[in-house]
């Protein structure tokens, strides 16, 4: 179930797209896992943001 993928089609501004390209390039230069794709970077960002959100929610309880 972990590696099941769903295609997500979204519209983003050109500025955000350029920032994503820059982030992907940064990941590519600073990780040793080989080729990095935009989808991988977005999944990583979402996972990390989700962890931060969960921690904040737990502190509020």
Image (cartoon, rainbow, N blue to C red):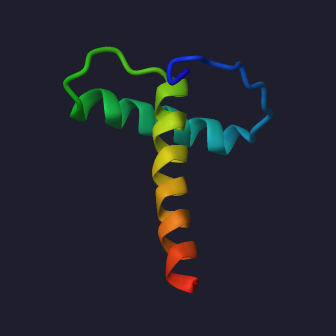
Q: Residue 40 in the image: x percent, y percent?
A: 47, 27
Total tally of numbered discs in the picture: 0
Q: Nearer the viewer, residue 43 or 10?
A: 43
Q: Is residue 40 left or right of residue 8?
A: left
Q: Nearer the viewer, residue 27 or 22?
A: 27
Q: Residue 27 in the image: x percent, y percent?
A: 33, 34
Q: Residue 36 in the image: x percent, y percent?
A: 39, 21
Q: In the displayed structure, would residue 9 be above or below residue 47?
A: above
Residue furthest out toward the bottom: 60
Q: Residue 11 in the image: x percent, y percent?
A: 80, 34
Q: Quadrant of the N terminus?
A: top right
Q: Nearer the viewer, residue 9 or 51?
A: 51
Q: Quadrant of residue 14?
A: top right
Q: In the displayed structure, would residue 35 be above or below residue 14?
A: above
Question: What residue is at 50 percent from the left and 32 percent from the top?
Answer: 21
Q: In the displayed structure, would residue 49 be above or below residue 4?
A: below
Q: Is residue 23 left or right of residue 34?
A: right
Question: What residue is at 59 percent from the left and 17 percent from the top?
Answer: 4
Q: Quadrant of residue 23?
A: top left
Question: What residue is at 78 percent from the left and 32 percent from the top?
Answer: 10
Q: Quadrant of the C terminus?
A: bottom right
């Amino acid at each position: 179930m972990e590696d099941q993928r769903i295609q997500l089609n979204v519209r983003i501004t050109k500025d955000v797209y350029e920032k994503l390209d820059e982030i992907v390039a940064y990941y590519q230069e600073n990780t040793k896992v080989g080729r990095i794709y935009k989808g991988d970077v977005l999944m990583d960002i979402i996972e990390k943001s989700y962890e931060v959100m969960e921690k904040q929610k737990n502190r509020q309880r």
